[in-house]
Amino acid sequence: MSDHEPKIAALLAYEAGELSPEGRRRVEAHLGTCEVCREALASMRVYDELVRDVKAEPVPEPDWSRMELALRREARRARRRIGPAVWVGLAAAAAAVLAFLYTQRGAPEETLVEAPRVEPGEARPEPARLRITGEVTAVVQGVSGGTDVLDPVEVGTPVREEMRIATASGALAHLRFYEGTGVVVQPDTLVKVEELREGRVTLALLEGAVASEVTPLGEGDRYAVRAGDYTVRVRGTRFAVVHGESGTAVTVDEGVVEVLRGGEVVATVAAPGIWRSDDDVEPIGEGQVPEPLALAPEAAGWPVLELPEIDWVRSWQVRGRELPPGAIAMRVPAGDCDVSALGDHGRSWRGRIVLAGEGQLLEPEAIRPSAPEVRVGTLAPALIAPVVERGKHGLRRCQRQVDLETGQTVVGQFTLRVTIGRTGEVQRAELASQGEPPPAAYRECVLSQVGNWTFPPPTGGIVTFEQPLRVGTVQ
Amino acid sequence: MDGPDPLIQRAQGGDEAAFNELFRRHRGDVSRLVHRVIGASPDVEDVVQDVFVHVYRSLPRFRGESKFSTWLYRLTVNVARMHLRRGRSRPRFVDVPVPEGPREAEPAETPDRAAERAERVRALYRLLDGLSEKKRMVLVLHDFEGVPAKEIAEMVEAPVLTVRTRLFYARKELYAAIAQDPRLGPAVQALMETLPGKPMTTRDGEEGGS
């Protein structure tokens, strides 16, 4: 049952009253047998309530007078540094002013906020297709490139027409072609940049997978990935192409792409969607097309953060973005940068690095895992009991569900052992038995129910308690 | 706010009084949008201030090709995004206290109900932290602020279809997260009992059709 994906689109249509009487009847019949969809529908209704709550929340009135003062200060500062007439259009000067402002406030800014573009999209002059140069913005592990794929590829390596890029197993490369457009070259991939010109990008995917993000294109512009006999063409989207011996597959997470063969459109894939040439080819999952890093125009000037390869690290997190383990080099905005390393069994490391100039290498010695911290606290049984009591209804439902689904009658005396975390959430739950172990489906259901219980937060640390369960003698 | 608004032109020419008037006209909308994007937080005020500092700096480059309000919303969204990005790189699981102060709750509402609602909203914002930035922006603008998809597309510089896709996925992820959330999940469980087509659990039914 848990493999079933909730039919969100059908449920939304059902909620909006857009279905025919027959359609409604079918959805209701399905709801009668599908817990996943019942839960999804209930969640949708709870979400609608929450939206009403959000809208009803009063917005606190800021202290406008303080803000007016700050804006006056800003105006004075701007006058001192540069006259308003000269200042128009000088992005570099604006960046300097911004840097100055944040220095004054003692909070280092990491990146300049992009001012909205004001050029009308349609009025773009049609220029000669000049060659452009992109840049490698991040690499994980070994990546090589060049026309013969022998040169090491690093952050800052220019990306030009005719360049080939090869990634080893476990390696990745993020490339920026121009503002808002770039690609993640996935592990075990060989790709050639066939065309890299203003408004024209063509990649030839020889093997492996690439995930592209493409800013909306102008009239006559083109972004395409060729993979074997197929060409995948887009106008502005996020999509991934996988190509290998078994065929070609396309996953579209945003926008629409066209798949062509011999100049003919063989498929139009709209997000969320997957197309594959053969059943054997394994596409990148829906919603899992990765976003290339550092596509902002100013990213070329950002410092490079380098992280070493460390055996206990299972994943990195840099500025909230999860990255695979291994030696990483990536462009990040100057200023404070928070980095976390996550290992097994709750081991982790967290640090803040101030990035400036060319960048910084984080030494392996600086990254020591913390031991999982466990402190035992207290929580009065009188505060535990009502939560368990309320939860028993769900446990009885597990029993009925297993009866119905497997025909097995659950009977026995079990012990439920629950660990309550610091905020009252269930950190761990186990179901032990003195005799026959409980059926797996029952155990899974109970633990999933218990995982949703919430207790009052214990004092001083985590708390573990045991609750006997007698099943089979009560209805 | 459309076309060549003389007030905007004066502000662009460096007239401080005109800029102050623009600030007074739009500060309420900006403040509400920031609040909706980042949630109840003591940082709202700083973010609103940053927005107007950026407006001050970018205004000379505004040429009136889009509505001023769209341009301002886009800038607000960008500044709020930068704020969220900074927040994401800090350790989270912090429950942000709601700032105290005079609150104009509706007269019919008891303090208990208002506190309960605020708690539900806080739980929802914790879940929003799990969404990607792009999805979060589209969801907030569309569902909380009621901005039509076409206008959002202009603000985030993406095709309307992309906006719709992001909205669909954002909601889908949220529905799943709500059901699993310790604070909001019980409401889902309770509601499941009342839905149409509730299965009869006491006798053998037909087999599942999914």
Image (cartoon, helix red, strand yellow):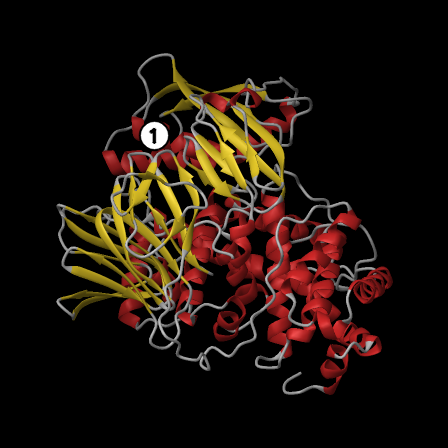
Q: How many marks?
A: 1
Crowd class of label 1 (few under 14; some 14 to 19; many from 20; radius 10 Å): many
Q: In this orientation, does residue B194 appear?
A: no
Q: Going 53% across and 25% down the picture, which residue do you hit?
A: A348
Label 1 sits on residue: A442
Q: Position of residue A213 (x, y in %)?
A: 39, 57
Mark 1 belongs to which subunit? Answer: A
Q: Quadrant of the C terminus of chain A?
A: top left
Q: Position of residue A424 (x, y in %)?
A: 60, 31
Amino acid type, residue under disc 1 in the picture: Tyr
Q: In this orientation, does residue B14 appear?
A: yes
The answer to which of A461 and A398 lies nearer the viewer is A461
Q: Is residue A149 above or below residue A78?
A: above
Q: Is residue B27 left or right of residue A381?
A: right
Q: Is residue A19 above or below residue A332?
A: below
The answer to which of A454 and B66 lies nearer the viewer is B66
Task: Give SS at disc 1.
Answer: helix
Q: Going 61% across and 52% down the picture, which residue do you hit?
A: A111
Residue A338: quarter of image: top right
Q: Position of residue A68 (x, y in %)?
A: 84, 65
Q: Is residue A233 left or right of residue A290?
A: left
